[in-house]
Amino acid sequence: QGSQGRGRFPGLRGADFSGMTREHIDSIVRSARTMSNLVNPMTTRHVIVADPPADSRHPELQGIGTQVMDAVRKQLAGNPRYVLVNRDSTAAMLQRSRNRDSVMQALGGDMNVSIRVMSARDDSVRVMVSLFDATSQSRIQSVNISAPAGAAASLTDSIARLAVAGLFQLDHTPRRGSVTPPPKP
């Protein structure tokens, strides 16, 4: 019969844990977390979320893009793995350069999320969210959605969920070897 039913918390059909105290349970949970952290340490990733570039001909498209990125920020803020790079710092850097590599290097970002919203034919819009992780073997993913212009604003949360899911997937792909940062200009 082996060791089934023996030990500190014996029962008729194996271990009976009903006699465990809160201290016992807390100790087990702490041990499990420690082992999990040893096997899969949770390092934080610094994520740059870039608002769309200004478009004086179509300010409504910029507004849709900003709404999507606000929803992405909100969803990432709830995950302790992702640390959002300051929005004002990101905006200031994007005024100087929209080059992804130089922005990431200047702001110390590990991952980048950017968006482009464009008019499409037949009164519709196309939303393109680009996801970038320099250390991932995949490096880049994108989320592309076309929708009627009137419905695009109501889809912001859905587009943001797709973008965050893509970012999570990119974050969990195999890693590259060492990555050499681009030289400073």
Image (tube, rainbow, N blue to C red):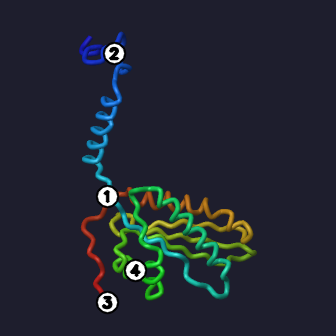
Q: Which residue, given by chain and number where applicable, does mark 1 sit on?
A: 43
Q: CA distance from mark 4 to mark 3?
A: 12 Å
Quadrant including the C terminus: bottom left
Q: Earlier in the sequence, mark 4 or mark 1?
A: 1
Do callouts 2 and 3 mark residues in contact (Cβ within 8 Å)? Answer: no
Query: Is mark 3 in CB contact (under 8 Å) with mark 1?
Result: no
Is disc 3 placed on a helix, strand or loop? loop
Residue located 56% across and 64% down the image: 71
Q: Quadrant of residue 8?
A: top left
Q: Please report the residue visible at 29 percent of the width from the left and 52 percent of the height from the top.
A: 41
Residue visible at 40% across and 56% down in the picture: 80
Sequence-earlier tag: 4 or 3: 4
**At 67% across and 73% down in the image, what residue appears?**
125
- On residue 103, which mark appears? 4
Q: Quadrant of the N terminus?
A: top left
The CA span between labels 2 and 4 is 59 Å
Among numbered discs 1 and 2, the one appearing first in the sequence:
2
x and y, in percent, of residue 97 in the image: 44, 86
Q: Amino acid at mark 2?
A: Gly
| Secondary structure of residue under mark 1 | loop
Mark 2 and mark 3: Cα distance apart in space? 67 Å
| Residue pointed to by mark 3 | 185
Q: Secondary structure at mark 4?
A: helix
Q: Which class describes the residues within 10 Å of circle 3: few (<14), some (14-19), or many (20+)?
A: few
| C-alpha span from label 1 to label 2 | 39 Å
Residue 163 vs 5, above or below: the answer is below
Amino acid residing under circle 1: Thr
Tags 4 and 1 touching, CB below 8 Å: no
Q: Residue 116: which quarter of the image? A: bottom right
